[in-house]
Amino acid sequence: MVRIAVDGMGGDFAPQAIVKGAEQALKEKVAEIILVGDKARLVPFLENPDEIEIVHTDEYVEMTASPSAALRKKRGSSVNKSFELVRTGKAQGVVTAGNSGAAMAFAIFTLGRIGLVERPAIATLHPNVSKGTITVVLDGGGNVDCRPVHLVQFAIMGSAFAKSAFGIEMPRVGLLSNAEEETKGNDLTREAHAMIKELGLNYLGYVEGNHVHNGRVDVVVCDGFVGNIALKITEGVAESLMAFLRERIEKSLKNKMGYLLMKEIFDELAKKTDYSEYGGAPLLGVDGVCIICHGRSNERAIKSAISMAAGFVRKNLNESIKETMIDHFRG
């Protein structure tokens, strides 16, 4: 069975939510689990401490720490110990809800990059109106300043990821811009656009913000500054919409009756817009499977992230990306 190293100390609700999610994944035989962190703080939340392996370290990276400082001073931290387990072959993937910048820095430092990748990218998953599908947006926050070649590599990795992870034979790729016309955009997008057109991908050109959720493309490429804003707007709109619906339903008996008649639809909407349903976002371009979770992740999100990591290991996701990168740059 696939073995996943879980950073037990990372996240706003660590260690309790992390431990509970990991234990649930183990119960459901999603994967074998190695919990990494302060044993004295992890064990009290375990129902059966003898059934789960713990790698002890009392060092962890605070959510507010800078990635560079963590890299210098926290090499014994739970997140880096998790990556070391992958590097030494004792685990096949990492799940962390901790400091995302530090996770990315340690992933690059400890695992290294896949050949030819200059900048690994966080691939966030966004629901769209096409039934049962999602849109992959990258970079979701790992690289706030990018050069055109980085966006080119994001396009290749995103396409390979969508094909390997979701079985899309020819993923449709778009470059996020302020309009669809080729004359729009800025220097970064215009130069990247010209380069991506030559790759042989199923590239549809510029897309706008509304295309992230309308199913027009499978992969949206942007720098991490824009991508993270897009992610936070998506989360904010989803949370506001559900809060508005709850408020309106409670207003009257008629509204409550209407809700009961449409409960199945409301439940489906809530599920589709719930970040814990997806678990986390894969970090593409490092030489190993890494899922970066939301800092607010609950136990359900952690279990989902472990399931995602195990699935990507079984699908040999990294090999697919590596082969695709080589095909495009050396073929």
Image (cartoon, rainbow, N blue to C red):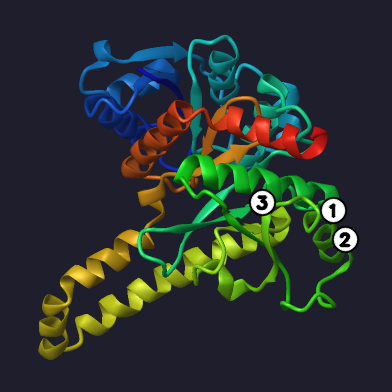
Q: Amino acid at mark 1?
A: Pro
Residue 234's spot in the image, x, y percent? 51, 66
Q: Amino acid at mark 3?
A: Asp
Residue 300's spot in the image, x, y percent? 31, 43
User: Dot 3 corresponds to which residue?
Assistant: 139
Mark 1 and mark 2 lie on one chain; the one further toward the N terminus is: 1
Mark 3 and mark 1 lie on one chain; the one further toward the N terminus is: 3
**Could you tell me which secondary element the residue under label 2 belongs to?**
helix
* Depth check, front residue: 25 or 178: 178
User: Dot 2 corresponds to which residue?
Assistant: 191
Residue 198's spot in the image, x, y percent? 81, 54
x 31%, y 15%: residue = 52
For the residues labelled 1 and 2, say whether their Cβ atoms are less than 8 Å apart: yes
Question: Based on the displayed image, in which of its 4 quarters is residue 279 positioned?
Answer: top left
Between circles 2 and 3, the one closer to the viewer is 2
Q: Is residue 221 left or right of residue 165?
A: right
Image quadrant holding the N terminus, namely top left
x 56%, y 62%: residue = 232
* Depth check, front residue: 170 or 276: 170
Image quadrant holding the C terminus, namely top right
The answer to whether one can see residue 61 in this image is: no
Mark on residue 148?
1
Question: Based on the displayed image, in which of its 4 quarters is residue 118 positioned?
Answer: top right
**Could you tell me which secondary element the residue under label 1 belongs to?**
helix
